[in-house]
Every structure is written in structure tokens, then in C-alpha cells.
Amino acid sequence: MLAYSTYSEAGGVGKTTTAANLAVAHARSGLKPLVVPLDPQDGDLSRLFGVDTDRTESVDNIVRHMIRRPSGEFDDLVRTIEGVDIIPEHNMLSDLAEYLQREKEQAEAMGEAFGMHAQLLRVLQEAGVPDEYDVLICDPPATEGPHLYNAIHATRSLVIPVEPSAKGRAAVEGLESLVAGLEDQLDVEVGVLAAVPVGFKNTRDQRTILDEIDYPIPEIIGERASLMEGCWMQQCSAFEYVREHRDRQRDYEIETLAQFDRIARHLEEQVGLEAPNPPEPGDLDHEVLSA
């Protein structure tokens, strides 16, 4: 199974839209992806895909499963959008640290072990996710904490959207120390599958910044603010937006979709995962297939 978390220390770099569009790109090729977003903020992946209607309700959710208090089956959490299975975010994620700490204290009082940062991995393994799915994508918030630690513990790999700017350069420079710290804290090896520059305008400074990135860069995505804003407005992926909500197809947007397809193939190749029905990159007539 291909598993990765989309992560960037810098906010506003398209982390969530990158995760969503890569998930759809995997699904378009006949693979079965599961997306587990963990961001407690409203502008999250659940909102992007329009599956966050129950986030304030007293319903079963991923946090309840992580603290061993589920009120239903794991499979009942899953919603399917554009061929992608997603576990919607819930407002309980805002207090995830407190819930996990409370459960840890109760477990230790009973002489039991409870790894606060291994609970998402436990839930996914117990639900049979590695056997049922081809791809796992976690989308944690940019800040360090139990959301990020659980995501990385579950996936062990990162895909990093990068803003080609001084802020983006600082975020990339801080990534090595962050990864080393996570490896020590979680006692796992963490790899970087790809860096994905977003908002590239081909300036000299931007080219210099990209030359300094040591991680694989399968594609460089240009400035696509209008396309991504449209995705948020219509609550869909860029593939769905261009196909259903644009009055005409724009070549540069079709090329952006092709880039997401090519990035997905690159990531699959890193773990030897062969897509059964890969589309011609950017082909909007290619049917989304379920594995």
C-alpha cells in the first residue's frame, strides 16, 4: 500500500487541495484510495469534498475510535466522493490532545500501555485498511502535535507542497530537523516521496529556491489560484471542477490536471504500485474507476 501524509510547515501552500487532487488522480487510475483528514479547522479537506455536514453533531467519528470509544463500525465513517473514500473531520479533533492524554492516563492507571501517537495506525490496522485499500493519504494540520504525529506514524512518508518563496525555503530548510525529531520521538523512519512546488511563476529567485531542494520534484505547478478557488466554491476536485463547472476548457488547467496524474504515477512507482487503468494524463473523459 502507498501511504503518505501531505505536510508543510508553511500555511496557504495548497496542502489540502494537493491531497484532494492526488487522491482523485489515484482513483482515476483504478486504485482504491482512503483519505484521512485530521485538520480541526473549517477550511479542511472534508469541507472541500462537501462531507463535513455532521462535524458539530454527536455522531461517531475518527476521534472516538482513536480513544477506544467508538459508537459504530469503522466502515460506517467512510463517505465516497469522486471515487475517493474519505473519513470526514469532526469538531472533536480540536481537542484531540486532551482526549488522548486522558485515555493515556486512564490506561496507565490500569497498568496498560497507550501510545498517544500510534492510535490512528492502530485504528486503521484493526479496520483492515492495508488490505482493503491501495493508497492511504493523511492530511494533518501544519502545526506539530498529535494530529501530525498520528498521521506520520500511520504513513511513514511525506509529500510536501512547497511555495517557491523565501517562506517556502525556510519551511523546507526546517523539514530535515523536523523529520529527524519525528523519527526520534516516534521511533520510526520517515521518508519524503516528493516535493511539489505550487504557485511557480518562473522567476530567477524561484528557480534558485527550487534548485536548493534536495527532494524529488516530479512536477512544478504554476499559479492556479482561480482553479483552486473554484474547487472550494463548488466543493470538488480540480478534475470535477474543470469537467463540470468551466464553460470552456483552458489548456493550462488541463495541463495542471495532467500534472496531478503524473505526480500520482510517480508516487505509486516509489512503492512498486501498478495502477490497473491509468489515464492519459489530464484526460477528462477517463472514467473514475473503483478497484
Image (tube, grey):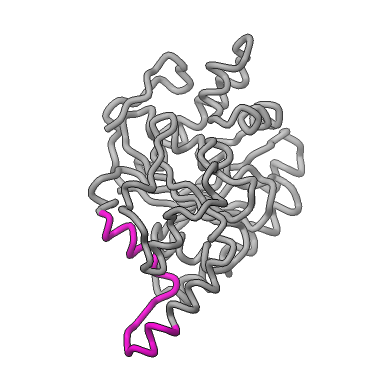
Residue 102 lies, in percent from the top left, at 48, 79
Q: Residue at x 72, y 42 (%)?
A: 206
Report the span colored magenta.
105-127
Q: Residue at x 51, y 39 (%)?
A: 51
242 relative to 5 in the view: left or right: right
Badge count: 0
57 lies above or below 182:
above
Q: Residue at x 59, y 62 (%)?
A: 94
Say if the magenta span includes residue 58: no
116 lies above or below 155:
below
Q: 216 or 65: nearer the eye?
A: 65
Q: Quadrant of residue 34?
A: top left
Q: 256 or 144: nearer the eye?
A: 144
Residue 177 lies, in percent from the top left, at 58, 69
The answer to whether residue 114 shows anywhere in this view is yes
Q: Residue at x 34, y 61 (%)?
A: 123
Residue 262 lies, in percent from the top left, at 45, 31
In the picture, which quadrant includes the C terminus? top left
Q: 176 or 284: nearer the eye?
A: 284
9 relative to 1 in the view: left or right: right
Say if the magenta span includes residue 123: yes
277 relative to 105 in the view: left or right: left
